[in-house]
Amino acid sequence: MRFTANHLTLLRILLLPLPFFLVYGGTWERMAALAAATLLGVTDYVDGVMARRQGVTSLGKLLDPIADKIFVAVIFLPLVDLRILPLWILWPILLREFLVTELRRFGSNAETPLNVTELAKVKTTVQMTGAGVILITATFPERAVPATLLAAALVLAAAAGLARRVRTGAFPRRAWIGMGFVALALAIRLAWDARTSVVIYGGVILAITLVSAAGYVRRALPPLRRAGLPGLLSLLATLSLPLVALGLLPLAPGATGLVLSIVCVEFAAQALDIWALQQGAGDLSWIKIRLLAPAALAALAAGLAWMPVEDAATLYLAFAGAGSFSYALYDFWHHRRLLRRGI
């Protein structure tokens, strides 16, 4: 069997738990997490090269962005759990990721396809680079070490870009973007303390992430308007499962793994549903929209009425987790033949 770009993307997703667990360790474990995340980030570039050589598939067009979104969740959520990054920065970042993915359902026709934009690629590079910068800054509060590491990263990025230019005649766009962000990060770190620098980095990442959503929202508005109130309600119901779970994280700090699992499973299920819809294989998301999301929200409302807030949050996470995992298992089983053909 030929090893394809889709296989490499799936391998990247399967290896993402490694940096997640390493972030919770000491200094050396965090540096190992940074190295692992960097290596996995490089595979994002490699599978793009493979896809162009082997031929881009319809599954690959959705699978690669979903892998990037899962990467963002896996890398940034521990930073929130460790109180390195504020939740108010991560929540709208993931809102954007879920929203854009779900809007593809409304803009998947031939007239208004929501293909990946150049700005979205810039956003992905900034997110991946920014996660490493934030981790370095939090691990080494004094200026000397992060400044040295950032300067070294800038030199390495420039060297890699120049090497690519010698081979192909063009300096990679992602190298320019990465160098620009690292240079900005170095200037910020030299000007402010570690805590302030982290918030500024997060703010820059958030701003670019939200701006990158504008084009998708603009193209999806006409079909979304045609869907009317039922379409809007279905959109909100789909977004509610992972985003409410993320918002409840401060009330259930021991449930970080569960929240992350819900977020990642929902990304995967969203991608599969939209791809299956594009392939004419039917859409199962009505189960989530009409049954699972309302049941989880009802459980949260009942919990808030009858028990402490922390217990109500735990109850919602239990309902959301069970519903999300069950739906994903059925979704993947139902579309198993389609997946075998696509991969």
Image (cartoon, rainbow, N blue to C red):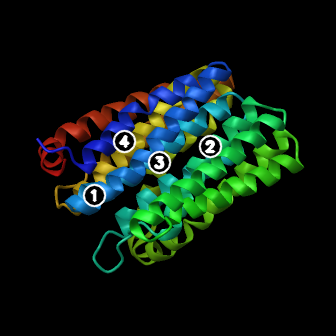
Q: Amino acid at mark 4?
A: Leu
- Name which residue type carries label 3: Lys
Separation of disc 3 and disc 4 at Cα?
Answer: 26 Å
In this figure, which residue is indicated by the disc labeled 2?
Answer: 131
Instruction: Give the number of the disc on residue 286.
Output: none
- Residue kind at label 2, given as amino acid type: Ala
In three-dimensional space, the C-alpha distance between marks 2 and 3, rounded to whole angstroms, equals 13 Å
User: Which comes before the other along the chain, label 3 or label 4?
Assistant: 3
Q: Nearer the viewer, residue 98 or 64?
A: 64
Query: Residue flagged by tag 1: what amino acid is it?
Result: Ala
Q: Which sits earlier in the primary sequence, circle 2 or circle 3? A: 3
For label 4, the SS is helix
Camera-near label (4 vs 2) is: 2
Q: Which residue is mark 4?
A: 291
Q: Is residue 117 left or right of residue 276?
A: right
- Quarter holding the N terminus? top left
Q: Is residue 270 above or below residue 105?
A: above
Looking at the image, is mark 4 or mark 1 earlier in the sequence?
1
Left or right of residue 265: residue 215: right
Q: Residue at x 61, y 28 (%)?
A: 31
- Provide the secondary structure element on which disc 3 rests: helix
Can residue 307 be seen in this snapshot?
A: no
Name the residue located 74 percent from the left edge and 51 percent from the top edge.
Answer: 185
Q: Residue 165 or 182: which is nearer the viewer?
A: 165
The numbered dot on residue 69 is 3
The image quarter in which residue 279 lies: bottom left
Q: In terms of secondary structure, where does tag 2 sit?
A: helix
Q: Residue at x 55, y 29 (%)?
A: 33
Tell me which numbered mark, 1 or 3, is placed earlier along the sequence.
1
